[in-house]
Image (tube, rainbow, N blue to C red):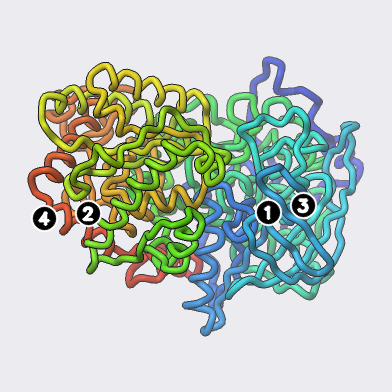
Amino acid sequence: MVQLSAASESQNICKPLPKGFNKKKFSITYNVVNNPNLSEIQNLAKKQCLGKNEWPVIDKINAWMISSETATFMKWGGLGMIASELPDAFNSVYGKNGDRLCVVTPMYLGDTGKKKARLDGDVYYGAEKASAKVKKIKVFDVPFIGDKSALVKYKVTVYTGKCGDTDYIFLSNDRFFSINPHKDNPSAQDGCYVYNEFGINEVERFAFFSKAVYTLIKNIFEGKIKEISRPNALIANDWHSGAISGLMKYFTVAQKDVCKMDGTLADELKSLPVIHVAHHLGYQGWDYENTSKILNSLYENMATTVFKNAKAIKNSNPRATNTLIVHDCYNQASCNFHLADRVVTVSKNYLEEVSKELGFGFDFRDILKIRKDHRNFFGIVNGYEKSLISPNKDKISVIDKYFENFDFKFFDENHLDVKLHNKEEFIKLISKLASDEAYRKKVIPLIDTYKFEDISKSVKNAAKTPIICATSRLVEQKGYDIAAQAMLQLIEKYSQFELEYPIFVLGGAGDANYFEMLTKLKDKVAEVSKKAAQRIFVFRGYKDEFAYAIQLASDFYMMPCRFEPCGLTQMEAMAKGALPIAMSTGGLVDTIDDGVDGFRTEVFFTERRRVYGSNLTAQRLKNNVNAYAETLQKALTVFYRHPERINEMKINAMKKDFSWNVEGGSLSKYYNLLRFGHL
């Protein structure tokens, strides 16, 4: 029988962590304890990573996808896509049998200048042009530290709504979920990641989100909220909901120990299985300055007790001995990596990378290796509804009207001659953007361009002119600098031949430094060949109609990524007949068949270590630039010499189906994981 601590003893146990404790030299020692509850907290990470907990019996799935982003209402990246498309597909396929996957997300309100969301009466208008009729369910209190270092009971309003086949639970709080930016908000941060008007940063915002979700679940299990049914599994979508496991499995036990929670309720909450979905491990939710504030907010007066017993599974990394911090810094992903019942990442190859390489797995490599060996870490490729990324007649019609007097046409894998027509139209469009400044400012007003040149007369044969694009974000991950060096090697090699030089269209929203680097590339190429440089178009910014027109026309899509956990861009490109030229990393390995529906490098390096490919190839190519340059040249050689093979590859690429619900696809894997705890 578990003996609870006496009330007098709890006064000594229940205390917050000292302010700024992490900013002093300290060491954590885990004393042997006789208290079974504290012993349970100490041993939990080991038990979870070794997969010792049995998966509960689940006859009908009633799971929650807990996500900071959704492509439906607030999107920034791929994790927003999975939060919308996976539940939609799941409910469409399994909903008829009574299984459900619901989305829990913040109700963001405000205007960043780029993203705008509002609640108007009983209709919520998200930032992605979607809306939902919502019903106010309940207002409940969420204790969290405010401006004066004391716990404040913040009001959270829970709304329910529906979009398509999916039920949504929206959590509203004016302070934490406002997206009105602070005057000091960095320009690169937008949407749900703004440093907002109340001085709330992204880590504090999503720690509060985790606490609000936990409090909502507790209210439901206590019977205080009857309009929402009990979930029987939770999917925590990336680091943003990374505190969920600690709240469900540590906080409940600690509260039970001091008689602040009924033992039966604590056991029910603790037993609710959590699946953590990790997208890119480089994003973990670090906050050094607010370490003690966030831990005290999450665990309240039990923070010291939890922290002093939050022992990580033994591994070779001295930075990760406590599940709540890494070294001396709050890390929101850490808790779920240690305590979740299952961990999923977004491709099989990325699973291998993060469990083998420090450059990918960071402080969690050893933990993930243990989980992989004990079969509670899985790689499931993100799906993508094919109808959303294949050429779309309505969208093409909109593009024609938008650009005025252009005639882009719909095509599929059986009509690649139409893609050639679109290439010809795009050459006209890019030339008009170069020659007509007023027109350019009208149709791509927020895009910076550099020395666009009219090529309408210099391109003699569009069929023999490859169009190569890269329209990803201008960030280090996407490897634009690798592409630039590979292109320079290419131009130097081909400058002596009489060829139709490739048309390169490179750019996207993001870092101005990468835009500047691309402008210098164009200038360097001009020193070798003015004709080749004329066909390099670099820009900074994003316009959906422009990006769509580029992909409709492109033969190839460059992805020289330093890492790409899953990648959705290559799926979009392939669906439009643009063959990816990609680095062999992450999900690019799982989704691109080299020489069949795209081109991949024979080798891939990280931090000077070979991660993919043979030793002999690695010795020959030496680095990623050489590997990518070789692959780029190989793709173009096939284009110039064997156009029929390129057409076959385009047909293969367009036929490929990454939809969630294809036979044996990702959807069935998630169903099995939720139902049985394994694939």
Residue 366 appearing in the image: no
Q: Label 2 is placed on what type of residue?
A: Asp
**Do labels 4 and 3 touch, CB within 8 Å?**
no
Question: How far is disc 3 from disc 1 in space, using C-alphas?
Answer: 28 Å
Residue drawn at point x = 45 percent, y = 65 percent: 397
Of labels 2 and 4, earlier in sequence is 2
* Residue lying at the far bottom of the rendered structure: 96
Specify the amino acid type for callout 4. Answer: Glu
* Marker disc for residue 248: 1
Q: CA distance from mark 3 to mark 2?
A: 43 Å
Cα separation between marks 2 and 4: 13 Å
> Is any atom of residue 24 visible in this view?
yes
Q: Amino acid at mark 1?
A: Met
Please name the residue shown 28% across and 56% down the image: 577
- Please tell me whether mark 4 or mark 3 is closer to you in this view: 4
Res. 597 mark: 2
Mark 2 surroundings within 10 Å by alpha-carbon count, few (fewer than 14), some (14 through 19), many (20 or more): many
Locate the C terminus and report the quarter of the image it occupies: bottom left
Few, some or many residues within 10 Å of mark 1 (<14, 14–19, 20+): many
C-alpha distance separating marks 4 and 1: 58 Å
